[in-house]
Amino acid sequence: MKVILLQDVPKVGRKFEVVDVANGYAQNHLFPERLAEIASLERVKQLEAKRAEAEAQHQQAYEKIKQVFAQINGSSFIMQAKTNEQGHLFQGIKSDDIAAYIKEKTGADIHPDEIDRQEPIKEIGSFELTIEHDDLTAKVTLAVEAEV
């Protein structure tokens, strides 16, 4: 199904871009969240002007993100969490938590979908994380320690 994205959607496309997605994904996620609309011929023509403006804004945002990735690439972070005697966390650390922690420590605004981690961290240790945005990649190390 061809849709027009109304916002940037990670791993799908940018605002005002016409993309082809699965029907179920469009109907169950993109349309209810108001992230996209059906790509009709007249609507595509209307959005061409807006697309040029959005492209310029995207380029500015890309340069800002490029600086952020350069700042955090190779960084190490230490996060503390409550654990039991075996070293397992009471609550798993998800991508949302990691993104919020990085923002708190560096001010870098990272979207949770950009962190390449499908499963939550459930035990103490050191974890190599990859953060991706378009063609940019940053690698960070997250050390999870028991809270004292």
Image: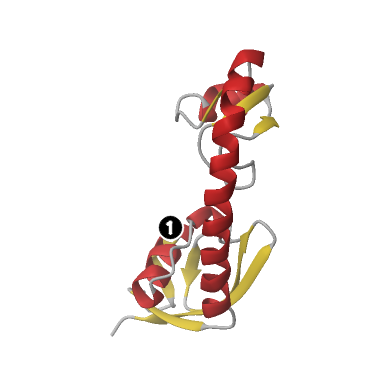
Q: Residue at x 56, y 39 (%)?
A: 15
Q: Residue at x 37, y 81 (%)?
A: 146
For disc 1, the marked residue is: 96
Residue 38 visible to an observer of this rendering: no
Q: Residue 65: which quarter of the image?
A: bottom right
Q: Residue at x 50, y 66 (%)?
A: 121
Q: Position of residue 33 (x, y in %)?
A: 45, 30
- Residue 130 lies left or right of residue 98; in this view the side is right
- Residue 14 lies left or right of residue 91; in this view the side is right
Vertically, is 65 above or below 31?
below
Q: Position of residue 132 (x, y in %)?
A: 62, 62
Q: Quadrant of the N terminus?
A: top right
In the depicted view, which residue is nearer to us: 120 or 63?
A: 63
Q: Residue at x 54, y 41 (%)?
A: 53
Vertically, is 78 above or below 17?
below
Residue flagged by tag 1: what amino acid is it? Asp
